[in-house]
Amino acid sequence: MHYSVMLKEVIEALNLKDTGIYVDATLGYAGHTSEILKRVKRGFIFAFDQDINAINYSKEKLKKISSNFTIIKSNFLYLKEELLKRDIKLVDGILFDLGVSSPQLDTKERGFSYHLDSRLDMRMDLDNKLSAYEVVNTYTEKELTKILYEYGEEKYAKSIAHNIIKERSIKPIETTLELANLVKRSVPYKETLDKHPAKKTFQAIRIEVNHELDILEKSLKDALSILNIKGRIVVITFHSLEDRIVKNTFKEVSSIPPIFKNLPIIPDEYLPKYKLVYEKVITPSELELQENNRSRSSKLRVIERIK
Ligand SMILES: C[S@@+](CC[C@H](N)C(=O)[O-])C[C@H]1O[C@@H](n2cnc3c(N)ncnc32)[C@H](O)[C@@H]1O
């Protein structure tokens, strides 16, 4: 079953207006968008995804609710440009529910899961050339170590990268289970006891394949620049690297620049244009955690344009 993370919290945080224009940057299987569409009867929703399977499914689901939506098959990196093409310069709310969807993870052929045996793939956009196979079989040991260390925060990055190079000199590493077993052999036995040791490696390679971190800051800045006054951006992240980018980007635009901090009067043009809606990060309720264990690492942050 597909479960939309923090659905109630997202709807509340968006502070929807019946006539508003909203953007879902990560449509997925349309759990959040469906609820937005039901509440925005005289407004409009632009929904982005780079995964054609998610788009095909969601189009049918949304049509049953209303026709006030357009789905755009594009990376949300081009959100601003794609909206401009449609004459949309400002919007009332934008949602980013980052990462992969459960159907992506659970569809064996997509090659995201270290539990299901499949060709190494991990592309969210099936039109992209770079897949996990190329990363694992062509990147240098140094590049692999860096990716595993930075994107997976994997402390055994060196040993895993070393074993990848060794193994692929005999024959290419073709499948998810070949890689998952290689990781198991590369870490101390105690690391394999309570969770799967390949989790971090798979996360790191997925981030590299889909350039997930490179595009986030620019996409958030573009999103901030097209918000109407009182418009909000809601972001759900699933690991600390993403959350750090969101937190820092939001902090930067909602704070008084350091050089003005000690002045008795701050000129209006230097007062922040945005405010954090919640000082603290929001996490799923106990009930949600019981119903959907996959939401356990999710964090939600919200910012509003105030002038
Ligand atoms: C966590 S799922 C979203 C689930 C959705 N909120 C729901 O309720 O069904 C993330 C979706 O965003 C898409 N995605 C991730 N990064 C993207 C990007 N940079 N551009 C466009 N789509 C992206 C993925 O393909 C996936 O379908």
Image (cartoon, helix red, strand yellow):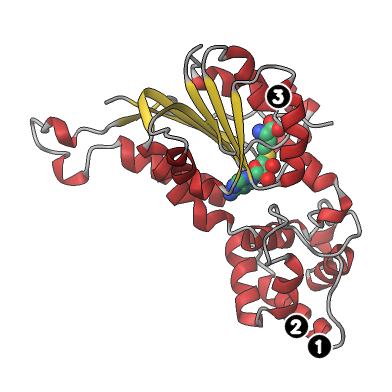
Q: Which residue is disc 1 drawn over?
A: 169
Whether 217 is drawn above or below 250: the answer is below
Q: Residues within 10 Å of mark 1 (few under 14, many from 20)?
A: few
Expressed as whole percent of the image width and height from the top left, the position of residue 219 reads 46, 47
Q: In what quadrant of the picture does the N terminus appear?
A: top right
Asked whether the residues under the numbered discs 1 and 2 touch, taking CB atoms below 8 Å apart as contact, a structural biologist would say: yes
Q: Residue at x 64, y 26 (%)?
A: 33
Q: As drawn, is 115 to the left or to the right of 269?
A: right
The C terminus: image quadrant:
top left
Element class at badge 2: helix
Task: For ligand 1, give the image quadrant.
Answer: top right
Q: CA distance from mark 1 to mark 2?
A: 6 Å
- Percent position (x, y) of residue 176? 85, 63
Residue at 70% in and 30% down: 30
Of 51 and 300, nearer the camera is: 51
Does any atom of ligand 1 lie closer than 8 Å to the CB of label 3? no
- The answer, for residue 211, to whether it is visible in the render is yes
Residue farthest to the right, as pictured: 117
Q: Position of residue 246 (x, y in %)?
A: 47, 43
Q: Would you identify the image quadrant in which residue 39 lies?
A: top right
Real-space Cα separation, disc 3 to disc 2, in angstroms? 46 Å
| Camera-nearest label, 3 or 2 | 3
Is residue 131 left or right of 207 when viewed as pictured? Answer: right
**Three-letter amino acid code of the residue under disc 2:** Ile
- Dot 1 amino acid type: Ser
Please name whichever residue, 22 or 294, is drawn nearer the observer in this view of the structure.
Answer: 22
Where residue 85 sits in the image (x, y, percent)?
A: 45, 41
Would you name the residue on which mark 2 appears?
165
- Amino acid tagged 3: Leu
Q: Which residue is mark 3?
A: 62
